[in-house]
Image (tube, rainbow, N blue to C red):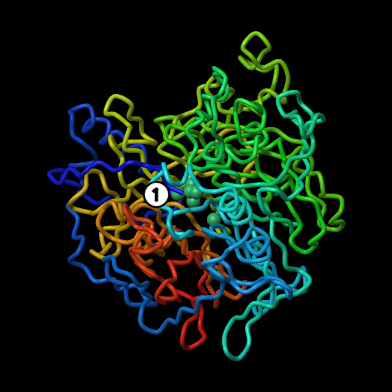
Amino acid sequence: MDEAEFAPFAENDRGISNPSAAPGIAELIDRRLTRRAALAGLLAAGAAGWTGLAPSPAGAAPSVAAGFEEVPQGADERDHLPPGYGGQVLLRWGDPLFPDSPAFDVAGQTASAQARQFGYNCDFVRFYPLPAGSDAADHGLLVVNHEYTIPALMFAGVAPGRAAARATTREQAAVEMAAVGASVVEVRRGRGGWEVVPGPYARRLTATTPMAVSGPAAGHRLLRTAADPAGTRVAGTFADCAGGGTPWGTVLIGEENFQAFFGGKPAADAALARYGVDGQGWYSWHRHDPRFDLAQEPNEPNRFGWVVEFDPYDPRSVPVKRTALGRFRHEGATIAVNPDGRIVAYQGDDERFEYVYKFVSTRPWNPADRAANRDLLDDGVLHVARFHDDGRLEWLPLVHGQGPLTAENGFPDQASVLIQARAAADRLGATPMDRPEDVEVCPATGRVYVTMTNNVRRGADRLDRANPRPANRHGHVIEMIPPEGPGGPDHAAAWGRWDLFLAAGRPGVDAGTSYHPGTTADGWLSCPDNLVFDPAGQLWVATDGALAAGVADGLWVTRTTGPERARTRRFYRAPIGAEVTGPCFTPDGRTLFLSVQHPGQVAGSHFAAPATRWPDFADGMPPRPSVIVVTKDDGGPIGG
Ligand code: FEO
Ligand code: CA
Ligand code: CA
Ligand code: CA
């Protein structure tokens, strides 16, 4: 979700594209210092951005890359794909998932029905082949997150705006609690396309599903509540945004804006304030369930903001909150397997001026014994990133007793370091970033890409090389380069390098944009969020917030190496108000799953008069967040 406020655009800014596209890998690092030296001079001279570089031909050059004709920029009630591609709506809010699921009744929705149906605001998507361990591309499980609810678009009679959302009835709040979390859905490709198979794998995680807590913070006094005096069992998950997958076939889902679900009067507590838990939540839940009332359960927010691991192949497995990965507003957790077998989880903390983290497991994973990896993520070291202006990337360990992380500074044990990971990272001098979102690792090069979605509040007095633009409305993508170790890129290393991959916005219009100079008028993007690499090695970038630049969100594709590096091309355009999330390919690259989240979410849009009725376009039916399936008419690889 994106709660950013967007000021009107400064149309008088002059932006220039980056001419240093298409570098070779060795050349890239050499060039960086030269370019940075030039930038340093420009910034010191007061230039607002990366002006002075070669002029951009943006809009003049057609996209010559093979594969597809770019979808034009714009915004309307429908979604759009390039010619030669087909889209099919696979899963809509309210769709039955179990053999006994009731049919969706938008006028009479109940919590018990919702708990057996596809949830609201689908986000992260990951495909798990069936049978497990195979590379099947026509049969599998989809894990889909459901991030949050929009009462004005879900329920007749609820006005748009936060005041009405905070006043939903007990039954409506119960529907909302059943509409968040995640779904596991069996899907199969048949002659008529992809279809849902209601069967034994189907599962819903909701805000009330029993979960375990493990790792260093399990049982800590800050996690204990009236309902759970031991601090080891939590009811449910919500605010689940992006996620990742482990090599042993479990899924990780990230609890992001958990603060939005709490209300009531909080105690004066710097630890709560550091997470924005201020009682100004977006919902009514605290009025109907005391555990969401900060005055009654001040520790309940400490039980959210974690990464949750569960086994999609076992619907009876108990999901586990892995506290060793730290507590913050997790966009997700992206796994890299280090050459020595240790597991590295890259994570963004999605709020302005927050940090990029990585967790490094103590032990290597065991490919021969799935059960041996069950608690692997409970033991390891969380690190936070400092992006040095000279291109070095430093990973600072969050370890109790090391450096400033002592009892005198408020960290009496490792559990406190993890529960208050933001405060610990503050102490270590991590680099405050422009809202870190998703992370992906290029399978071919081992380079790591992390999106900064935007940060309109960064002032000119707080610029650094990794966050180089004031009032950053359009965001950027950073490339992290692990050092080469024996056997490949060393993701566990304490030091690496970094570079700017692209700076978003309208080339030639917005200050400081940086793309391949051939990027077209349809090819620029704004507010990068979710990332995924396809099997051919192309990087796909989904956006959340482009409408503030006058165009609908969507999905773009680019190369990270070679002559097409950082030339983004628009592949998909979402219906108005929607962000695009969860891009996910089948192992053959011939099917793309996309979450279309919060269609119709624009100011004033509500159940009776929504900005779009996508995808049903039926009278009386509001827009429904949905997962779509994209295939190529000739059956070939997507974007190929
Ligand atoms: Fe839920 Fe960070 O987007
Ligand atoms: Ca977002
Ligand atoms: Ca996101
Ligand atoms: Ca991703």
Picture layout, residue 142 above or below residue 281: below
Task: Report which residue position mark 1 lands on.
Answer: 501
Residue placed at 56% from the left, 27% from the top?
Answer: 422
Q: Secondary structure at mark 1?
A: strand
Residue placed at 69% from the left, 46% from the top?
Answer: 236
Picture layout, residue 290 above or below residue 12: above
Residue 401, how many percent across, how many down? 70, 16
* Residue 606 visible in rendering: yes
524 to the left or right of 330: left
Picture layout, residue 144 above or below residue 218: below
Q: Nearer the viewer, residue 170 or 515?
A: 170
Picture layout, residue 563 above or below residue 270: below
Residue extending furthest left? 12
Residue placed at 47% from the left, 33% from the top?
Answer: 280
Q: Quadrant of residue 266?
A: top right
Residue 543, how many percent across, how many down? 40, 56
